[in-house]
Structures are given as structure tokens and as C-alpha cells.
Image (cartoon, rainbow, N blue to C red):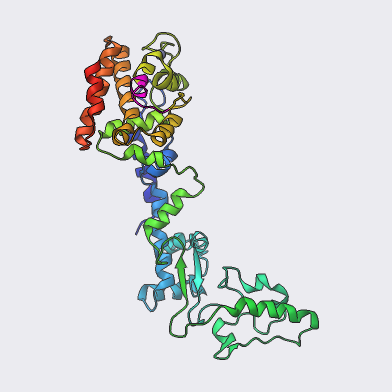
């Protein structure tokens, strides 16, 4: 059985594995992208690395689910004997400080569980008529407090208020004239509900079509809580057979987390304050990959072969979105979306050559490298219709 403590230690290890640990005398290390972002799913702009805390919580919730849905099992009977039942779906809160810590951690998750389930009426044996939210998930005691205050049995179960002729409601006193309308709307609310005498009352998990809990769906729900920003373009980074290192690199460029001088300076490293490709201005992510005079010539190479009008966006993330959306012509479609990764990869290699190895290529050579890489990826992806790329290589 998972326990909370298990999740803490590996998380630190995994974080250090992906980040740069500071060497002795070099001070603190650094991480290119926030760990919370890394743990988002790929569709939401992360790397899809499991958040162990949420995964652990989801695994523990599975036991709460089993409690709601299993009848007559020994383990459940033991738990009930030890803690007592709050209702048919859960035990009383565990307040003892010692012993049975596992169930205490599980029981503590009941509030999260409750937010993600609803009750489905069957024979009405378990659900309380007034107190449980079995119609529109709101208890009748809350939607009709005036009638609840005069009901005969606030703890009655639904089956006790039902006869084969219909609802059998009794109140402590005769109704006043002004209350008759309220009872009419109350009965209207109940009108659409029929008890299913041969099926038990059930708890339904909201996030699966079949209403059953799965750890996977609970994890997805947990990881997405409070996170917006699903974009199709994130998904398109990870598709295709281009090298994984290029996919990761593209992700970093879009996140503006590549180790350009702009980023290094933010991390407290003082370096040469100029772009290695044009020597004209500082090296920021957007400059290096979009607006630099050197890089712009490679973008133009591709923009010249398409008829779409284009103005260069300010940020790499905007470029990626527009580029994918605008696409090329029908025959270009398949390889068109590989172009940003291909350009950024070629530019980065050239930049690193100049920065670390004192080796520079002409723009002509970088264009040629870029086109050859693109052609190679197309072959790997079995994309045909690459005549235009071959023509471009020939024209250089
Ligand atoms: Zn530049």
C-alpha cells in the first residue's frame, strides 16, 4: 500500500536528475523549467512526468472507492468495527493519534473524493431522503429548508418515503395554505425519480463514462486542478519520429528556457552580452530563434515557397501556434510543421559552435544543414511529397 512518505524522497531525486545540481564551490544549481510545469501532461505543456504526491493520493483514494462499492468483505468489516460508519459510504473521521495510520491517511481524503462523486438512486435503502444530495446533488434539506423543518423523520431513507403508488410524505402538522404551493414544487422535483427496486444505491465517479473510479482518471483530475491552457500545439511537439532530443529542445525554446545568455544572466551568470550570430544585440530567446538577421534568412527561405502572408510574432510560443495553424499548402502540410524545430535546432547548433568551439559556418551552409535535416526527418516519417525541399537544396 502506498504511503505519503514514499513520494517525498524520489521526487527530490527525480528533480535533481532533470536539473543542474550545483558543484562544490559553485553555489546553487538550477532547473531550466519549474518542476510543477514539468509534471503537467504533455497536452498542457509539461513533460508528463508523474507527480508522485498526486499519484499516491489517487492510489489511496482507490481504497475509499472500494469501501463505497464492496459489500461483505473482511477488510471492510474490520475497518467498520474499528472506526464505525459515518454513512454507508464512509467511516467516521479517524482522530486517534496512534495505530492504524494508514486508514487515517485514507479517510482524510474523503472530502476530495466526495467532490468527485455523486449518488445514484437504486432501491433507496442507503440514501437518506432529506440529508443526502441524491437529486441534482443538493440535499432536499437545503433546497427545501421550510419543509425539512416540519418533516416527521429527518433521517428517513428514500425507500421509507416511497410506496408503489408514489411518494408518501408525512409532516408533523397540517400544512398552511401558503405551504401548499411549496409542496407542489417539491413533488414536481421528485416527479422524475423512480426507485429501481432490484438495484442497490450507488456512488458514481464523475470522471469516467462507466461511473467507476480509476487511479488514472483520479490522477488526471488531480494534476489538472487549477491548471488552464490546454493547447493542441503542445501535443504536436511530441508527435512524429524526429529525434527525442530535438523534441525536448523545441519544448525548451517554446518555454523560453533554453540556456541563452538571457536565461543565464537571470541565473546570475555574467557572459558576453551579444548575439553570436549577428554581433548586434543581446542574445535573448526571441532574438536568437526569431528576429536575429541570421535566423531570419532561414525563416525567409521557407516563407518564400508559401503564399501565406506572414509577420513574425514576438515570441517563440506564438510562432509555433501560428505556424501549425497556418500550415503550408496541402502537399506541404506534413513536413511544414517540422520546420520550426528544424530551424531552431540548426540555429542552436551553429550558435554553440561559435560560442564553445570557435567554429562558424556561413548562412549558406546553415541553410543547407537545415534543409538536409528536414529531408532526413521526412524520410524517417515516410513523408513523400518532398520535391519542394529537394528543389530548395538544389537552388542553394
Ligand atoms: Zn543576432
Residue 119 appears in the rendering: yes
Q: Position of residue 180 (x, y in %)?
A: 75, 82
Residue at 24% x, 17% y is: 395
Quadrant observed for ligand 1 in the rendered image: top left
Magenta stretch bounds: 299-308
Residue at 38% x, 48% y is: 52
Q: Position of residue 252 (x, y in %)?
A: 38, 30
The answer to whether 170 is drawn above or below residue 258 in the figure is below
Observer-nearest residue: 19 or 3? 19
Quarter of the image where one finds residue 67:
bottom left
182 horizontally vs 127: left or right = right
Residue at 44% x, 71% y is: 68
Quarter of the image where one finds residue 101:
bottom left
Seen as rendered, the residue at the extreme right is 177
Q: Position of residue 125 (x, y in %)?
A: 50, 82
381 horizontally vs 68: left or right = left
Asked if residue 306 is among those painted magenta in the image, a careful observer would answer yes
Q: Position of residue 332 (x, y in %)?
A: 30, 33
277 horizontally vs 315: left or right = left
Amino acid at each position: 500500500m502506498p504511503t505519503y512518505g514514499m513520494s517525498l524522497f524520489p521526487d527530490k531525486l527525480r528533480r535533481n536528475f532533470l536539473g543542474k545540481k550545483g558543484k562544490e564551490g559553485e553555489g546553487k544549481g538550477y532547473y531550466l523549467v519549474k518542476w510543477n510545469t514539468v509534471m503537467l501532461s504533455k497536452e498542457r505543456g509539461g513533460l508528463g512526468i508523474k507527480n508522485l504526491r498526486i499519484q499516491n493520493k489517487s492510489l489511496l483514494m482507490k481504497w475509499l472507492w472500494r469501501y463505497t462499492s464492496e459489500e461483505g468483505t473482511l477488510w471492510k468489516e474490520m475497518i467498520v468495527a474499528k472506526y464505525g460508519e459515518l454513512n454507508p459510504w464512509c467511516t467516521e473521521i479517524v482522530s486517534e493519534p496512534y495505530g492504524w495510520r494508514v486508514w487515517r491517511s485514507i479517510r482524510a481524503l474523503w472530502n476530495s473524493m466526495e467532490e468527485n462523486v455523486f449518488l445514484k438512486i437504486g432501491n433507496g435503502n442507503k440514501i437518506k431522503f432529506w440529508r443526502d444530495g441524491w437529486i441534482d446533488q443538493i440535499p432536499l434539506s437545503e433546497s427545501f429548508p421550510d419543509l425539512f423543518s416540519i418533516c416527521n423523520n429527518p433521517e428517513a431513507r428514500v425507500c421509507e418515503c416511497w410506496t408503489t403508488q408514489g411518494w408518501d410524505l408525512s409532516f408533523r402538522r397540517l400544512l398552511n395554505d401558503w405551504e401548499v404551493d411549496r409542496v407542489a414544487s417539491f413533488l414536481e422535483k421528485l416527479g422524475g425519480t423512480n426507485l429501481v427496486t432490484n438495484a442497490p444505491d450507488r456512488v458514481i465517479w464523475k470522471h469516467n463514462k462507466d461511473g467507476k473510479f480509476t487511479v488514472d482518471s483520479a490522477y488526471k483530475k488531480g494534476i489538472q486542478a487549477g491548471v488552464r491552457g490546454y493547447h493542441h500545439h503542445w501535443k504536436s511537439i511530441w508527435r512524429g519520429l524526429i529525434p527525442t532530443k530535438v523534441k525536448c529542445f523545441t519544448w525548451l525554446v517554446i518555454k523560453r528556457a533554453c540556456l541563452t545568455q538571457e536565461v543565464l544572466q537571470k541565473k546570475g551568470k555574467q557572459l558576453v552580452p551579444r548575439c553570436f550570430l549577428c554581433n548586434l544585440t543581446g542574445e535573448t530567446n526571441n532574438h536568437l530563434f526569431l528576429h536575429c538577421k541570421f535566423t531570419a534568412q532561414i525563416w525567409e527561405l521557407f516563407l518564400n515557397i508559401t503564399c501565406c502572408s506572414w509577420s513574425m510574432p514576438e515570441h517563440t510560443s506564438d510562432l509555433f501556434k501560428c505556424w501549425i495553424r497556418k500550415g503550408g499548402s496541402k502537399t506541404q502540410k506534413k513536413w511544414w510543421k517540422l520546420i520550426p524545430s528544424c530551424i531552431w535546432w540548426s540555429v542552436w547548433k551553429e550558435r554553440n559552435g561559435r560560442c564553445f568551439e570557435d567554429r562558424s559556418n556561413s548562412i549558406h551552409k546553415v541553410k543547407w544543414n537545415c534543409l538536409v535535416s528536414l529531408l532526413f526527418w521526412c524520410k524517417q516519417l515516410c513523408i513523400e511529397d518532398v520535391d519542394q525541399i529537394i528543389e530548395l537544396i538544389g537552388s542553394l
